Image: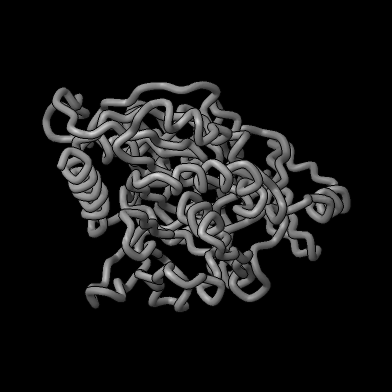
């Protein structure tokens, strides 16, 4: 470095990284993960699945497209902070309305640049996602011993229910569809299906994909009961992404899902929703060493042989060995063979670990929203006949 460090990252094992701070000043403690996506830093920072985590971006050019309100996945960022290779450059994008550094200040989030992110990523892969304390002080004054102590005192994500912290406070209606040139986000004016979406930390683009698939979407908080869901007489139930330990969230989510499964209503889950469905069906979840975070993860559909390039963000996974009879593993990661999808035999009930709505990421998996719509269509026709 050619200047005095103004930011410091302290790992619980005592390892210290220095860099240049940007964004908000102060300190935060969290779990550290890395994300390999080449685009979409704003969407990543505003993904509720990153609650309780500081994100290391392996792609060096962060900040060069600025930020725009259109790309927020939620009203405020949930990631605790960001670590980057190079200091953010000035925005060069016709859509940008604000610089990343100013946006972080306004959202009270700390950034740190000038870091050897390759070294940091290797440390995460080898040792597992560490607990860290991130500090930004323009004067460069850091109490290293205290920062390490704070990192060691962080309770971690195991056993932690974060869905309650990121879910909506009350139910609401959603009709905005996927972005389209030149008018932006159109509205769904002719929906064919009534869908209840359970918000464990739902991204806006998930709801847009549901609307684009012909759904009239009502979003309910994570703590909604089966009675709350069924009272709306939905054609389908969607279980969203979200942060934290699925076993902790399952304490109240699993009974609701079991109540819905007692009916013939189609169910579709992603990410934490996938894990919630698996728990409700009798499977177990496990904490991963460093998780999957990126927009370039290959996943194989075991039933078709097709390989999809997917967007992922999860630190827990469904234990495929624990899947009970009647629950079929449909997708697996080609990185490590971990479970990435299940379905219930003979029922329109399925889920995937990855993010078919992307944002950021490839569009390979949008067909899953259409599969959900097809399942609801068949269920409606069967009820009539």
Judging depth in this view, the residue of 325 and 134 nearest the camera is 325
Q: Where does the image place residue 363, in percent across and percent down from the top left?
A: 23, 54
In the image, residue 241 sits, relative to residue 207, either above or below, namely below
Residue toward you, 139 or 209 = 209
Residue under the image location 29 percent in, 65 percent down: 309
The residue lying at 50 percent from left, 36 percent from top is 226
Which quarter of the figure is the C terminus placed in? top left
Q: Measuring from the top left, give residue 86's x and y in whole percent.
A: 49, 53
Name the image quarter holding residue 265: top left
User: Which one is in front, 28 or 367?
Assistant: 367
Q: Is residue 6 left or right of residue 234?
A: right
Q: Residue at x 42, y 48 (%)?
A: 62
Residue located 11% across and 30% down the image:
182
Residue 59 in which image quadrant: bottom left
Residue 37 in the image: state x and y as whole percent.
39, 57
Residue 223 locus on image (x, y percent): 58, 34
Give the image's coloring scheme.
one colour
Q: Is residue 125 left or right of residue 385?
A: right
Q: Observer-nearest residue: 47 or 267?
A: 267
């Amino acid at each position: 470095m050619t200047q005095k460090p103004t930011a410091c990252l302290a790992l619980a094992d005592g390892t210290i990284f220095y860099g240049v701070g940007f964004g908000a000043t102060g300190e935060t403690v969290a779990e550290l993960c890395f994300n390999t996506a080449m685009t979409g830093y704003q969407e990543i920072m505003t993904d509720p699945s990153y609650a309780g985590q500081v994100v290391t971006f392996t792609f060096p050019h962060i900040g060069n497209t600025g930020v725009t309100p259109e790309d927020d996945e939620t009203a405020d960022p949930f990631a605790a902070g960001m670590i980057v290779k190079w200091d953010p450059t000035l925005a060069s994008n016709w859509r940008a309305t604000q610089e990343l550094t100013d946006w972080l200040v306004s959202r009270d989030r700390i950034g740190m640049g000038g870091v050897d992110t390759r070294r940091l990523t290797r440390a995460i892969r080898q040792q597992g996602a560490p607990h860290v304390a991130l500090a930004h002080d323009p004067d460069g004054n850091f109490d290293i011993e205290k920062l390490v102590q704070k990192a060691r005192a962080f309770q971690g994500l195991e056993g932690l229910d974060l869905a309650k912290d990121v879910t909506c406070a009350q139910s609401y209606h959603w009709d905005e569809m996927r972005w389209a040139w030149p008018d932006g986000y159109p509205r769904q004016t002719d929906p064919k299906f009534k869908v209840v979406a359970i918000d464990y930390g739902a991204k806006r683009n998930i709801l847009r994909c549901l609307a684009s698939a012909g759904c009239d979407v009502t979003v309910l908080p994570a703590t909604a009961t089966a009675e709350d869901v069924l009272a709306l007489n939905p054609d389908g139930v969607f279980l969203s992404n979200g942060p934290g330990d699925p076993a902790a969230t399952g304490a109240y989510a699993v009974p609701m899902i079991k109540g819905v499964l007692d009916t013939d209503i189609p169910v579709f889950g992603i990410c934490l929703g996938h894990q919630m469905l698996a728990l409700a069906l009798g499977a177990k979840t496990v904490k991963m060493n460093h998780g999957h975070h990126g927009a370039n993860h290959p996943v194989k559909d075991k039933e078709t042989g097709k390989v999809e390039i997917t967007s992922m963000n999860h630190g827990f996974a469904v234990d495929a060995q624990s899947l009970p009879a009647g629950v079929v593993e449909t997708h697996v990661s080609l990185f490590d063979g971990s479970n990435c999808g299940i379905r219930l035999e003979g029922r329109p009930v399925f889920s995937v670990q990855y993010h078919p709505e992307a944002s950021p990421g490839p569009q390979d998996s949008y067909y899953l929203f259409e599969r959900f719509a097809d399942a609801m269509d068949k269920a409606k026709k069967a009820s009539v006949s």
